[in-house]
Amino acid sequence: MSRWVLALDQGTTSSRSILFDHEGNIAAVAQREFTQHFPQAGWVEHDAGEIWSSQLATLVEVLQTAGARPGDIAAVGITNQRETTVLWDRATGEPVAPAIVWQDRRTADTCAALRADGHEAEVTRRTGLLLDPYFSGTKLAWLLEHVPGARARAERGELCFGTIDSWLVWKLSGGRHHVTDVTNASRTLLLNLAGEWDEHMLQLLRIPRALLPRVLPSSFEAHIRVTVAGMDIPLTGIAGDQQAALFGQACLQPGMAKNTYGTGCFMLMHTGSRPLASHHRLLTTVACTTGSAAENAPTKPALQYALEGSVFVGGAVVQWLRDGLGFVSRAGEVEALATSVTDHGGVYVVPAFTGLGSPHWDPFARGSIVGITRGTTRGHIARAALESIAFQSAELLQAMQQDADAPLRELRVDGGASRNDFLMQFQSDLLGVPVVRPAVTETTALGAAYLAGLATGFWSSTEEIATRWRVERRFEPAMPRDIAAARMHEWSRAVERSLGWASG
């Protein structure tokens, strides 16, 4: 019997490979960081070739570390940074331009023009998304306009578009498979809520259909085989990082919610088999869906849906304190600096470094620090920076509960910053509900492993997966509700001063 499932976790700043055993525990892990490119203000790029080489290096390393042999790996699952956009040559497998990262703001004016022309309501009705440079569609449109010859080559079928999952599958399969899954496709502005590429959106953004990958369920039968370190392994799971984390957190029923504290923060609430429209500028998105990948299957798998709120700068504010301001030498030192003062001292940090996401959706917002006095110290700024992560997430949950019209009983959390006890307690205080940290916080990779393992029988059912979710710590709210409300009001005042700053 196979011993492990392999998850490839391709993130915004690093690539990782993790082996999970039958209990959902980590057996081995390997990680490589890769270069972040900022060619202009508001632009963020990656080298897709470097992403591939870093991911391949971790894959080989983790198998060597574990001493894996043929038959030890039941399946491979992929999870990835979602909206990052890659355009490559179908014949050579080489990118024709740098990958445009989800954080990139270069298409803000394009989105504003489409919004001014009255397109946003129809875009939201079809895709569940908003007109924002966050999503892949306008990034792809930009590449087709600015890479010499790209549009003509795309129309001739010579180029491939994909989010990072598609790029990795293409490389792993030697160019045999150009595919994506419904969760990643649902973030492109090109897929409708029925799970199909939308002709209206393709025409609106002038995207040739020949560029697009085939859309699969998130967990599917073994039609894709990859050769890794001499081993033939089925690739049976793909999901965008946030939907993978929702699955890995065993939020499998309507009303269950999780928040991932990574480079950004992403809160998702499962809403079941029908898409729920948001009235508070949240996103309606596709959750992980299981089913056959066969093109001639008699019925398409029933899609699952979620409401999502996106915070563009979450844990990245800690990197800014470390690398930009030099307040600490290691990210782990921020909590000690933040708790070196007894309170925030009236200081609020709004980390709108690349605009603001939900529920503001303002690509022209910029970062600010307000409330500074002569008595302000590094500790106050560090504390306010950490608190900003919780404030932004609290805004999301308030909007989400109003849309869902149902109270949340607890918030499950994961991601690097979820290990910060101060932040998690403050988050619970603001929300007024328990914040629950699981024993395995690598739930993004775990979700990808679960999806792959389900398709091969490594795990028998979603019910079995739900029983494997275990609590490491539960943070109970301790702040009086009137004080929490006052803090949220002060935060809103601080945000108002950041909105629209870059629009002149």
Image: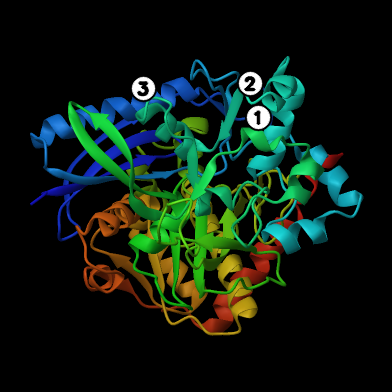
Residue under pointer 2: 39
Question: Residue 336, position in %: x, y?
Answer: 34, 50
Q: Residue at x 23, y 29 (%)?
A: 228
Per the model, the C-alpha gap separating discs 3 and 2 is: 22 Å
Q: Residue at x 52, y 84 (%)?
A: 407
Given this view, does label 1 or label 3 mark the residue nearer the observer?
3
Q: Residue at x 65, y 33 (%)?
A: 210
Name the residue nearer the viewer: 116 or 460: 460
Q: Residues within 10 Å of mark 2 (few under 14, many from 20)?
A: few
Residue under pointer 1: 43
Residue 196 visible in this rendered orientation of the protein: yes
Name the residue nearer the viewer: 191 or 404: 191
Name the residue nearer the viewer: 140 or 353: 140
Q: On screen, 366 above or below 260?
A: above
Residue under pointer 3: 53
Q: Residues within 10 Å of mark 3 (few under 14, many from 20)?
A: some
